[in-house]
Amino acid sequence: MKSAGFSLRRLKALCWKETLQIFRDPSSNLIAFGLPMVMMFIYGFGLNLDSSRLRIGVLDEAMGTESHGFSAALQASPSLEVHRYETRDELAQDLVDSQIRGFVIIPPDFSRRVKNPADTAPVQVVTDGSEPNTAHFVEAYVNGIWQTWQLQRSEDRGEKLEPEIVMTPRYWFNPSADSRNFLIPGSITVIMTVIGALLTSLVVAREWERGTMEALLASPVTRAELMLSKVLPYYALGMFSLLLCVATAHWLLKVPFRADLLALIVVGTFFLLSVLGIGLAISTATRNQFNAAQAALNAAFLPATMLSGFIYEISSMPAPIRAFTHVIPARYFVSAIQTLFQAGSLWHVLWPDIFALIISAAFFLGLTARLTRRRMD
Amino acid sequence: MSEVVVSFENVTKTFPGMESPALDAVSGEFRTGLITGLAGPDGAGKTTLLRLVAGLMEPDSGTVRTLGFDPFADSAAIRGDVGYMPQKFGLYEDLSVQENLNLHADLRHVIGEARRESFERLLEFTDLKAFTDRLAGKLSGGMKQKLGLACALLGEPKLLLLDEPGVGVDPISRRELWRMVEDLVDRGIAVVWSTAYLDEAELCGTTLVLNEGTKLFSGTPAEISDPLKGRCFHLRQPGEGKRRLLTDALLRPEVTDGTIQGHNLRLTFRPSTKPFEPDEIGAGSEANWSPVKPRFEDAFIDMLGGGPPGESPLTARTEAIPLDGKTVIEARGLTKKFGNFTATDHVDFDVKRGEIFGLLGPNGAGKSTTFKMMCGLLVPTEGTATVVGLDLRHSASQARQRLGYMAQKFSLYGNLTVVQNLVFFAGIYGLHGKRQRERIEDMTEIFHLEPFLITPTESLSLGYKQRLALACSLMHGPDILFLDEPTSGVDPVTRREFWTHINGLVERGVTIMVTTHFMDEAEYCDRIGLVFRGQLIANGTPDELKQSVADDSNPDPTMEDAFVSLVTRREEAATET
């Protein structure tokens, strides 16, 4: 029986066919090569959790040297874009219109009270509470500038005002506290998911829809060959994209990558196999491209964006959702790849994530194997 | 010398969600040395049987033996020796001809010298040598089909299963493929050719005829039509009003089936009855009977107990439109380009009130494109399409109120019930209240839809879906009816019934424009336009077209003969200039 058993020749022929199809199909091309680059740049430049240059308004009712000094300090801050106002009404109106994020009012008796050591000089800070994050930033910046300004003022007058405690924050792993440095590694998760789950979810379904699966099943192809011929080319494609993304992040977007290649390949392999498993299982079960794409979007893409900890902190989610994130492979990959980028190849930190990814890869590929049938009904 | 390679006994297969089995206790065998025709309308169970034989499915009960093995349990044992071409040929459209062949050669371990030889031989055989670098998706229907065949033939199978290879292919390519398959049979391969066209089955060495999952007949085509010997006649020169005459003839008890053949009627009589005097149905003094050879389709209808009654209840319920002899449909220099592909190329024709005009041609010839421009669904690149004097480019919606349209693919809402579909279509054509109720009652009665009113449309049989589609398109009483491939895939009895309705409408003055790739169906038309590669290559009555190609070797050509000759003539003329 010449046709029984596994044949390397058949597997090679099927993989070659799959490869040709990937390169010839414009939509595969776009998903595999175009989309990763677009997403890298969107997450790299478009999405930014740091708030820089907040627009605020300043109304100086004191019009004295002291108040001038303070408002000049505000203006000198790189974090604020300060606009001067003449009346309180204008300030309120612009805040309502979202023209400014907050405002500072220096009252008429400011100069007098600030000179009196027994008195305290009040400054009014109003912020837009509908965006609490930004509101906090405004408050913190103004506060900080106020402190520095006072310090500066004492020094100028020759008084040595030695503070008892000085807080000097240091950010480990991400010294510049730049959110890009953790967003870009996280975005690689989304890219890998798109390639792994979305692209592969279409391919088996497409074979059923076009009737080519029927022709394959009538040939001596075995189940193992059929499945491997879908996994291997897309694994190669996914790894290529992963390296491309890391290279782009490191050299083009200047996100430091501190791990070695081996760790990246190990982590990438098991995550990629998990998402490939999800995509293929969906595709094999639905046999319909539209349903497969819908299912892949909901089962892989959305969890990878929302529940992986890539943007939203898992630790701040409600307990049931936090528990649910444990079955999402993307969660482990996000944590692993952020470690790789920011901390390095710390194997003892990576092992739990790698272990979880091995289990999920085995589960989803096993599921695909169970669903793959050599029959039409 | 002929060897049984496949046998199956009492095979039954039911799919979940279907009421009746796809195959119900079917027995039979396939042999070497001849082409076995697996014939039957859509839904008869042809594909299911082929898949069972190829080991792609397991029967619920009964046994199948393919090349001495249980094809499902021992599938690995038969794979190498069974060539299988699924519907739509199973080709990778984004791979080239050579890449498709390479893939299938590798899958079947055709390597080394044998591989080189096979490629050489198959490319020669299929005439695809010049096209090895072309993507399969860019081949014509006929070439795709040949490539599909070549792929199925790699590894020298002993059994070749072809699932509807004749669909989507022009008659010339179909004839070519037929000759190739005959050649294979001579080399000792057993070939099974499944088809919904009964004229195709007629050419096979032996046939297995299925209908709704049961076996109707097995044997040679000659055996099938044997009981009809001496029962089929043409009524020649019957004078005017052939449709009325057919209706009257069908009302006579001795007539079991009848169709229109150009100017003539073709009738089947009950066993041991004689044709009546033509005068008795007012056929005129010129009319005379001439016996004709029974055909496969006559036999098929006879086995199902004869054709439908001749009088359509639709006739009485349709308001008569006075025949004013006016041209109601007109195409002038009609052209449609998609990119640099010209789907319709300067087509001209006229249709007069009360005529049936047919556009005949293979799939992909440009019929549907022309058709869609005529009912205002596509805007022509060049030229004009006029219906009842309205230019469709400017007053499409006004014209649409006057015309009914039945689309090629089932275009009703599958998850609505029959009555919901009727109400919906009545509503979009502006019928309300009492008028809507009456019209729906009429349609229900005419098309026998009462038992299915609250059935979801998707679970109707193909025949009933088609009836419902016709009912919906007639709801607003249009004076022009457009039918796009109305009967493809339905069984011949349902097709007869469909044409009975159409004839009834025409008698009341409704104008019909129809597209079809059934050569036979064209015989119902008053005039036919032959469409090939976007051009209208001939235009005339069915008899005129047939007569134009008659010669000594073929004094009584069929519509298909006419088509093939006219296309060949045209191509010869093109190469000369």
Image (cartoon, coloured by chain):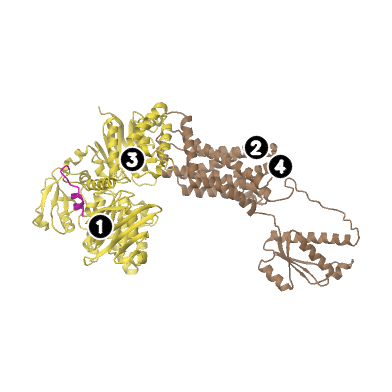
Chain colours: A brown, B yellow
State the residue at coordinates (38%, 55%). Answer: B337
Q: Secondary structure at mark 3?
A: loop
Residue B63: image x %, image y %? 33, 33
Amino acid residing under circle 1: Phe
Q: Secondary structure at mark 1?
A: strand
Residue B45: image x %, image y %? 32, 42
Is residue B81 magenta-colored?
no
Amino acid residing under circle 3: Asp
C-alpha gap between disc 3 and disc 4: 61 Å
Q: Mark 2 vs mark 4: which is more N-terminal?
A: 2
| Circle nearer the viewer, 4 or 1 | 1
* Image disc number at residue A261: 2
- Name the residue beneath numbered marker 4: A343
* Same chain shared by disc 4 and disc 1: no
Residue range corresponding to the magenta coloring: B541-553
C-alpha gap between disc 2 and disc 1: 72 Å
C-alpha gap between disc 2 and disc 4: 14 Å
